[in-house]
Image (cartoon, grey):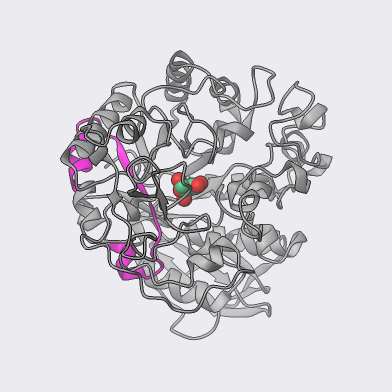
Amino acid sequence: MTWWSGAIGYEIYPRSFADSSGDGVGDLEGIRRHLDHLTWLGVDALWITPFYPNPGFDHGYDVSNYVDVDPIHGTLDDFDRLVADAHARGLRVIVDIVPNHTSHEHEWFRKAIADPSSAYRDYYIWKDPAPNGGPPNNWVSHFGGPAWTQDARSGQYYLHLFLPEQPDLNWENPEVAREFDEILRFWCERGVDGFRIDVAHGLVKDVRFRDNPQIREPTPDMSAGEVFHCYEHRYDLDQNRNIGVFRRWKRVVSEYDAMLLGEIGPDNPARHARYHDAGQALDRNFYLSPVWSSWQPMILRDKLRALEMIGGDSIAWVTDSHDASRSPTRFGGGDRGRYRSLCLTTLMFGLGGMPFLWEGQELALEDGIVAVEDRTDPVSTRNENPAGGRDGARTVMPWDTSHCNGFTTAPEPWMPSQPRPAELTVAVQKADPDSWIHRYRRLIELRKKHPDLHEAPAEWIDGDHGLTMTLRRGRCLVAANLDDHPSHVHLPDGNWSLVFTSRPDGAGVVAGELELDGETAAILLVG
Ligand code: GLC
């Protein structure tokens, strides 16, 4: 048994979780002071997004030193205290590692650019201009514009799948691999229990740097994301050789009983599953389609079922993250969006693997409201078309009804946003047993109390039709009706009782039939 079998995770964006120093930016000490919230909720592991020194072009995902803490978030001592206190409470700590790119301010890149003959030059990906003087190929950045920037001094272009301030590392260079072995060991020695791997599907690139096939013509009015999807990312992403990097990492972290949790982009279930490599590479992989999409029941049904059947245990199931609009907003807004989101999460809690909640998801938060002039995400601030900006998901955690929802004592948080109403705060929801936070907590409690829900072999019992997904695992059964009309499930023999319903009074058992309201999920136990 590994520590992560059956575990439930919780994602923390340190800037926005809790500010202990009063400067308006969340910090590691703020997280430490709120560990009780996480133990009360019942999760097993926290994934903390990057807190390393960084110039802030992508809020931490532009790392300038992999083995320290950014002063805005605290110190290494704060980190050690956080890990010690988390462990004392039985909570595991997963840190975020960013191996696809560094910051342009990392000393490796500074040296690479200052002296093209330096050994660090080959830590990055440099190419001569195309014959017309332009970029070496047609690759585009996830964040808008070409994926290449010309270095005036040498005339060569360097690759960046994200911002020009995030130059891509060259994973063909054995020195880069060696550096990362050391970085992993540094954090393992400090007691971390795992690594979430940023853009895990992006590290290795096509050896010939061929043009990506174009699917449609990009137009000037498109958002960065739309332009990105004008291409099939055949040569910049998802190369088979990525998996070799993680086999190597697995050998390193296994010595410390730490896990590898990949951010895996491909939507195709079979391509996605290969990163697990029968337990030789990544232990759990985020499946991100439900994080990016609107409410699309048919697609969700087909994709989730296919993934579960290929290997649900290797998946980290999520509806939300710091990278997309919050699911209650994305799924239609208001209580309808909230119920859809909980319906999907309930199903995910039965799919095996490792479900994750994103901070504030337990409150059923919709996106926060950020004034245009206060936006900070480069996806919106650096493109003509601001669509796809992630600021709304990243507003501060509403703890209570005091100043700045109890997040900070500073006059304003790092990214000002409209305060949340009382009913969306932790303090008020905790006091009300019918609130969202109690529903999420009950769901977490149930998964722990009935290990069959993730351990017992899964058997889909709903056939291939309709929008009701029903999965039996040993003594448990999970059913989710993704349709907006009520549905029925013919229950297997036995005395089944309802133990959880995502919507109050949304389900009932009558004469061997489960009746489910539209967009409702339920968990049943057989006596
Ligand atoms: C990942 C992160 C995202 C970041 C990007 C570049 O997708 O989740 O927040 O902007 O990588 O590092």
x and y percentages locating residue 370 in the rendered image: 75, 46
Q: 203 or 317, which is in the foreground?
A: 203
Q: 80 or 8, which is in the foreground?
A: 80
Res. 1 visible in picture: yes
In the current view of this chain or complex, which residue is farthest to the bottom? 465
Is residue 72 shown left or right of residue 172? right
x and y percentages locating residue 102 in the rendered image: 39, 38
Residue 338, above or below 490: above
Q: Looking at the image, which residue is at 22% across and 52% down?
A: 279
Magenta range: 246-273
Residue 154, above or below 457: above
Q: Looking at the image, which residue is at 24% across and 46% down?
A: 171
Report the number of discs: 0
Residue 211, by quadrant, is bottom left
x and y percentages locating residue 261 in the rendered image: 36, 46
Is residue 468 shown left or right of residue 47? right
Residue 235, above or below 17: below
